[in-house]
Amino acid sequence: MFKYVCKRLLLLVPVLLGVVTIVFLIMRVFATDPSENENILGKYATEEVKIAWKSKNGLDKPLAIQYVNYLKGIFSGNFGNSYRTNKPVMEEISERFPATIELAIMAIILASVFGVLIGLISAVKKNSIFDNIGMAIALIGVSIPIFWFGLIIIKIFSGWTGLPSNGRINSVFRPEDGTGFYLLDSLLQRDFEAFWDAFKHMILPAITLAMYSIAVIARMTRSSVLETLNKDYVRTARAKGLKENTVVFKHAFRNALIPIVTVIGLQFGSLLAGAVLTESVFSWPGIGKYAVDCIQNSDFPVIQGIVILTATSFVFVNLFVDVVYAFLDPRIKFSSKKGE
Amino acid sequence: MSSNQIFEKKLKFRQDSRMSDAWRALFKNKAAALGLIFICILCFLSVFGKYLMPFDPNFTKQSLANPALPSAEHWLGTDQHGRDILSRIIDGTRISMFVGVVSVFFSLLIGTVIGAIAGFCGGRIDAIVMRFMDMLLAIPSMLLAITLMASLKPGLDKAIISISIVYIPHYALIVRSSVLSEKTNDYAQAYKVMGASNSYTLLKGILPNIISNIIVRATLGISVAIIDLAALGFLGLGVKDPQAEWGTMVSESRRFFEAKPHTLFFPGAMIMLTVLAFNLLGDGLRDALNPKSKK
Amino acid sequence: MLLEVNGLKTEFFTKKGTVKAVRNISFGLAKGEILAIVGESGSGKSVTSLSVMGLIDYPGKIVGGEVVFKGKNLLKATKRELQKIRGDQISMIFQEPMTSLNPVQKIRDQLLESIKVHMKLSKKDALLRAIEVLKLVEIPSPKTRINDYPHQMSGGMRQRVMIAMALSCHPEILIADEPTTALDVTIQAQILDLLYDLRKKIGMAILLITHDLGVVAETADRIIVMYCGRIVEEALVKDLFATPRHPYTIGLLESIPKLNEDRKRLYMIKGVVPDPFSIPKGCSFSDRCEHCMEKCKHNVPALIQSGNQKVRCFLYGDALEEKNE
């Protein structure tokens, strides 16, 4: 097991190196010269200013040298400085990353619970009114543009429920230094008013972000459970005289979990990406909204950092999912081969 | 008639009857038929929309400084520049359908070639190509798309390029795994035994058998491409103003959202209906083409 | 009679139409008896066994008849009552040992599950009982194998585990649906011997469903031959093999290869089992029968007594089946 994880970790290195390279190439080869961007050097910067700025940021060197320098930096944890603020990229990102992760975790919990619930009910009560409603919700969930959905639920719910639709927390409650996870920080500091406020801020964005994943997980759960319900071992379980609930949960659902967990893992990636839109709608101060700001300002080092960090989290979540497999499916043995 | 010809004719017949079975199954599925009808309407609007629009989609009425509510003149109201929303939605249909179809075409074409080669050749080529696809897949799709858009700068052609690139690995993986499983099938082996060349086996023997899976994925892919284009537009990275595009329309009307929600509602609803139609059709096609999935 | 099936009718309502899988079947099963139901695939023998267990799923439905077990009609029993009987007094094993065990549960948990539901035993006693039944079905070193997952066992072993599971609560009837079909020939014999021995040891009745007359010859006491959802012949094993009556039974016996006969080619029943949507109007076997008469094509013969056995054929009498299908 330990050996398998190490092996997988080792295999991640070339993938992540590839991600770094791809992002570097996109940003440095295809993109227009950042020194031309008005937001960085102003509208009236002279040629000399531009050249000086380029050499300061190492952009005057040949591409290969830039690449090597960038890699060297990454291995020492240095992703360069933001073009706009001149602060180190890691610092800029780590201020905002907890906000995104907190939202994504909340959303994946929502998505897993409701997705699995809807899918399970739809499968067990196949062709019933519950099934039809559940699958209609799922179909709309995969079809609705989440930014539009976010704006619509602000319009509908924010008014009469008084749920906030802007930012993470009321500034008076903002926890001073801590993990950056406001829910966690406020609990640790026993500031329950702050916790409640942070929680309220999270409801609408989390629902928005989770909507697509709920739909995908529900559809997967339904088809997966329907398949296992037809398996011979479920018939065996019924022939044993088990109660229908036991048959469904212990036998059908337990076996259906394996593909469901895969989908949940993959959804985490789409949540990180969906955060770009959700955070823009709800002014959520995470890396998604920040990435959009940086793109409009050609702040390439930060974008590179964000993409690399997101890809890394995604890849690790998938590794974690593969390890969870072992507990769900005894047939999987961790041989030295890559489990595909 | 040689026995070979008879065999091919029988095969042809079987494929034909399979296709007509699939059509019948598709039309029996009311949801899928509804999706198909809506898509036909969208296609019609894309081509003949400019003759149906009540107004020039880019005609600005200075007298209307604020978005106007729906009225007899402007059925869906106007936006903040006094432009007729109905006309702009119709105009946007063309862009969304075009980007959806063309970007799926490109990523499908490139992805299929890559996946087919990787799956068929196997060995080192397969390993290298698939590792590269893994790298692209490690970056969440929306993030890759906006990164590409950011460096390419907004524009219709750039949007198509970005969205195509993002989904190449998805098609490559599907095609590769189908080719791998079909390659070991008896009929593919039979082609080999008969002495067919590799490319002949691939084109005549394997591709026709995985085509139904590809069609389904492509249909669902169009819906994803359309929603991605809208998302790019919403983030201000899509096609350039003043070209009407649904996502951009939603984004522009955010400011007036509190007072005039209709400016935002109609374009967003149009995105949803379009995506829904493609999803319905895609699901229906999957059920129709793959008898196993019928429950 | 321990179990009595009277006029059982099971139909499947598919999109293409209604399939009458079991058409008015009656038989009894005595205590400690091994009764075999023989037929080709599609003859309705498996559906019969599933109907007895109440395990017919949508789109299938039992539309008539009764299944009386110890004086109680199981078709009228509530879900709860059925669950109490299943796995306890009547248990069942299936054709595919490879897929009939839950792949993500240890053998131990799957065995304990039915013991816990049906027997009021302490945890320790339940485990002891589980090991005991594994010993009963001759699994070597049951104390360690009980912690295996199904995928760590061979097909024959898994079928033994299935039998152990079925026996764990002292059932009075064991329904074995093609228990040996998916197994190697040598293993088949072992499993059949095991079933035969167990019957003697425990004294339970066995309903053996199979398509293989060879399996029946050595194991069963009595045989029912089914064709297209009807019983065509019913007899003691020795009578059936000595004097088969129905042309279908004769054909089946003729097509078994025999060692001591020097024949060039095996006998073959002409034609194939009819499509379930176009079963002949009269005798179901009429279109394949060598002795087919005009009336066979239009009328269904009744199951009549002929000597020691029962047969459904106009060659042995003119009685017609009542029209209540």
Image (cartoon, grey):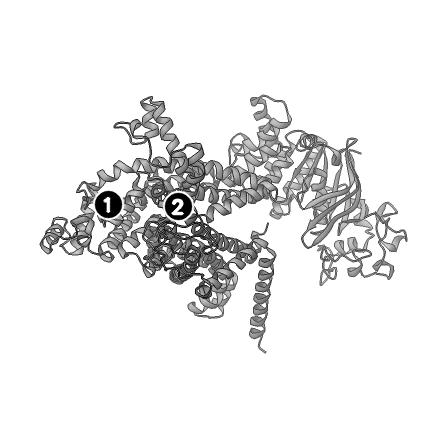
Q: CA distance from mark 2 to mark 1?
A: 24 Å
Residue A298 point in image, percent of width and height? 23, 50
Q: How many residues crowd around disc 2 within 10 Å: few (fewer than 14), some, or many (20 or more)? A: many
> Residue A263: in sight, yes or no?
no
- The quarter of the picture where residue C260 lies is bottom right
Asked if marks 2 and 1 touch (Cβ < 8 Å), the reply is no
- The residue depicted at 21 percent of the width and 42 percent of the height is A89
Mark 1 lies on a secondary structure that is helix
In the drawing, does residue C202 fall left or right of residue B180? right
**Residue farthest right in this picture:** C318
Q: Chain of mark 2?
A: A
Task: Please provide percent x and percent y for residue B165.
Answer: 35, 57
Q: Residue furthest front?
A: B63
Tag 1: amino acid: Val
User: For this view, does A338 lie left or right of residue C278?
Assistant: left
Q: Please state the total of marks drawn on the protein image.
A: 2
Q: Do pointers 2 and 1 mark residues of a single chain? A: yes
Disc 1 crowd rating (10 Å Cα; few below 14, some 14-19, many 20+) is many
Secondary structure state at the residue bearing disc 2: helix
Question: Looking at this view, is A287 or C174 the one in front?
Answer: A287
Q: Position of B243 compared to C179: left or right?
A: left
For the residue pair B186 and B132, the one nearer the viewer reads as: B132
Q: Nearer the viewer, residue A307 or C120?
A: A307
Residue receiving disc 2: A147
> Which is nearer the N-term, disc 2 or disc 1?
2
Residue A197 drawn at (x, y percent):
36, 28
Q: Where is A190 relative to B92, above or below? A: above
Instruction: Tell me the quadrant of the picture where the N terminus of chain C can be found.
Output: top right
Q: What's the residue type where badge 2 is placed?
A: Phe
Which residue is denoted by mark 1 in the rendering? A302
Frontmost residue, A160 versus C111? A160
Name the residue rendered at 54%, 45% in the picture. Answer: A135
